Image: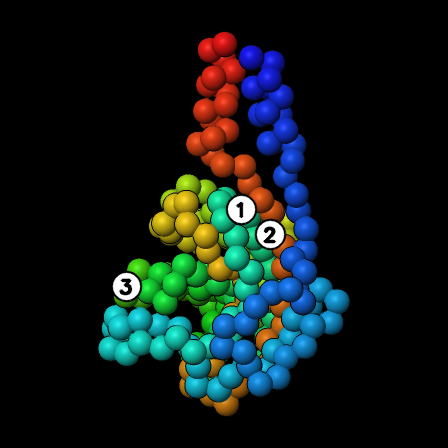
Amino acid sequence: MKKNILIAVFAILSGLSVSAQTLEKMNWFNEPANWQINGGTLIMDVTPNSDYWRISHYGFTVDDAPFYYAEYGGEFEAKVKISGDYKVRFDQAGMMIRLDHENYIKTGIEFVDGKYNLSTVVTHKTSDWSVIALDRPVDYIWIKAVRRLDAVEIFYSFDDKEYQMMRNAWVEANHPVKIGMFAACPDGNGFKARFENFTVRHLPDTRRTQWLRNNAENN
């Protein structure tokens, strides 16, 4: 019995897969007028006057920006390389993790008052917004999100090697989510956003793995 459980634990831990999501098989929410896929790259013309926000501070709710996604259950690590031709206030591009219209996380680059900001909006009924101002423009940014149990940890990197945490946010556990690439242009006439190397790596369920380990030790 103990041997069988140890084999199961090893199979789970060694069975992790890292693969580029097949972009052609993903889905649009609010499909933009113009977009294309070239190899592992998604390029979109961001819809003018579009955004994601719910109620707080501004007093309005919008849910109409383009979002290209796949659906995943369980725990995972996802990352993507993001760049954009940002032009006006609040132009933004990044990764979104979404349960429904009242529960989502969007994170990436946001152009505010002529400066580049690392931006995260967490929405549970109402939205909040946190930013990290960058001291210089950047050509691109990597965003990584790790979902474990009831939390998502969000990281950024300038080289896909050294990552820094920028946010830890609650998300409902054991609930499938839509995850993918979004961009929004609340104030302007649109801009071009580019997403490269979108990948999702399945992570074995934390509680199940711990249970297998505990039972292997007790048999």
Q: Residue furthest bottom?
A: 189
x and y percentages locating residue 27 in the rendered image: 57, 68
The percent coordinates of residue 30 (x first, y second) are: 49, 77
Q: Of 128 and 87, which appears nearest the observer?
A: 128
Residue 114, compared with residue 172, is above or below; it is below
Callout 3: helix, strand or loop?
Answer: loop
Whether residue 148 sits left or right of residue 27 in the image: it is: left
Q: Identity of the amino acid at label 2?
A: Val
The N terminus sits in image quarter: top right
Q: Which mark is residue 200?
A: 2
Please name the residue that numbered disc 3 is placed on: 125
> How many badges with numbers are in the image?
3
Residue drawn at x 60%, y 14% is: 3
**Mark 3 closeness class: few <14, some 14–19, many ≥20 residues within 10 Å:** few
Q: Which residue is mark 1?
A: 76
Q: Position of residue 76 (x, y in %)?
A: 53, 46
Label 1, secondary structure: give it.
strand
Identify the residue at image location x=46%, y=11%: 218
Task: Judge by depth and name the residue closer to the eye, 4 or 86.
Answer: 4
What is the distance, in whole Å, between disc 2 and disc 3 at their CAs?
27 Å
Asked whether the beta carbons under mark 2 and mark 1 sit within 8 Å of each other, the answer is yes
Labelled pair 2, 3 in contact (Cβ < 8 Å): no
Whichever of callouts 1 and 3 sits on the residue coming sooner in the sequence is 1
Q: Position of residue 122 (x, y in %)?
A: 36, 61
Q: Earlier in the sequence, mark 2 or mark 1?
A: 1
Q: Say which residue appears at 69% left-offset and 72% top-offset.
A: 37
Asked whether the beta carbons under mark 1 and mark 3 sit within 8 Å of each other, the answer is no
